[in-house]
Amino acid sequence: EMFLEPSKASYPSDLWSLGVTLFELVTKDLPFHSESDLMWSVAIVGDMDSSPPSVLDRLDDERRSRFDNKLAQVISTALEKRVQNRFQTADEMHEAVYSCLVDRGEACYSVFISYRVASEAPLARLLFDELNHSVTPGGHRVTVFLDSHRLVKGEPWEEGFAAGLLNSACVLSLLSYGSTAPLATLPPANSAKALAKGWEERPVGRCRLEGCEADAEDNFLKECLIALALLDRRDAVDRRAEERGFVQSVFPVLIGSQKTPGESGYPGMGSFFDVQAGGGEYPSTPSAPNNEAAASFLEQNAALPEDALTTIRSRSVANTMRQLTSLQGCRIWDHPSTLTEVELSRAQAELVGLGYTGPSVDRNVAARQPSLLSANSTLNKSSQQSCGFDERQLRMLKAQVQHYRADFHEIIDRA
């Protein structure tokens, strides 16, 4: 960038320079060669579409066979010539390097933040910004795994879990209308009445579960089953040496209903318990496809014993949600009346218009709102303009996150 158009040099340019430094540290050689500074620049920009050099090509056979392929790819990504193919932020590059340490068993994540529907994206982002790289009273430098890959980058569900949930000490599970309503069935006798009140037949575009073999796979339920199973194994007397999973705490974050301008309590939120399950009831039976998927994942990736897998396969949806909501957590809507709005950063301001915490439900008037994002959608700002968070609501949401920062830090230190 400095050679072609210096005015466009920015953070990714610095990360490219860091890639050069890492390359030299590993190989004792520069990634590009030339006889002069001018020709060195030409060697770099002469073919913008050529692949970046790999450290593996500059190592002897013995070192190459032992070198971490994933770290080699991180360095190559930092050296990409086109800005859009490079790491865009230091946080993104840090996450990639840190994941190499996690894979080697030399580190774990402090916190795993997972949201399974795009409606929780604003809160997930604010939690990440508040906690990542912060220091707890116990002196712990917090490293957060924000599980946004499935929604934003299209990575496989299992890959995100293998890198994140299995290697995190604390799990922040975001419970909201969007994540819980699809887990609850609308009883046939009451479905017409529930829909007339404004509840959705397909909450955020997802099929409701019935607790049977015909259920669709729901990634949020699978996440809950896995997190609780790992928590159950934390102090198990029969825990085996080959078992994986560092989870010490599951901390549910209950997200309330969204209030509108002019409504009492605005720009705060209403109670989560007014919108959880979306007017339905959690099935008292297991959701077979989801329970089996969770058990299979833990068998392959965490080496859980057969009796623990049997427990997972038999756990009902109602039991899962009851256990999750009974754990110590925090209620995003329940904040001091003295809490005041907090200014948003430039990046956080881009979240305005995103988010969805449930439809308007009227006991007397049928007021249906359209379903928004499916579980596999990417964030779509235009589709949520009518009911996404406005700027004041986001400012209050950020204030609520900051209000609970000490609680989050306490949980992390305890873990």
Image: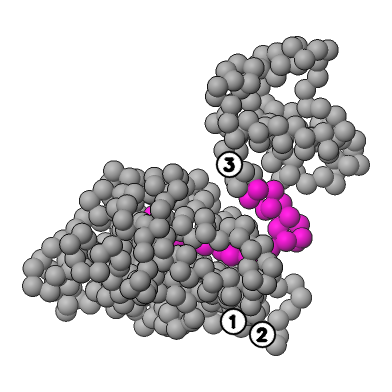
What is the secondary structure assignment of the residue under circle 1? helix
How far across and down, in percent of the image, does residue 61 sit? 90, 38
Q: Which residue is mark 3?
A: 89
Disc number lying in front (3 or 1): 3
* Res 193 seen here: yes
Q: Amino acid at mark 1?
A: Asp
Q: Farthest residue toward the left?
A: 364
Say if mark 1 contacts mark 2, CB within 8 Å.
yes
Residue sitting at x 81%, y 27%:
30
Q: Is residue 273 left or right of 263 when viewed as pictured?
A: right
Q: Is residue 18 left or right of 172 when viewed as pictured?
A: right
Cα distance in 3D space between marks 1 and 2: 7 Å
Whether the magenta-drawn stretch holds residue 414 is answered as no
Q: Which residue is mark 2?
A: 236
Q: Amino acid at mark 2?
A: Ala
Mark 2 surroundings: few (<14), some (14-19) or many (≥20) residues within 10 A: few
Q: What are the residue bounds of the magenta stretch?
A: 94-118
* Res 158 seen here: no
Q: Which residue is mark 1?
A: 232
Residue sitting at x 39%, y 45%:
350
Compare residues 348 and 96 and report the one nearer the observer: 348
How far across and down, in percent of the image, does residue 307 sit? 61, 83
Q: Is residue 325 left or right of 366 when viewed as pictured?
A: right
What is the secondary structure assignment of the residue under circle 3? loop
Residue sitting at x 70%, y 28%:
52
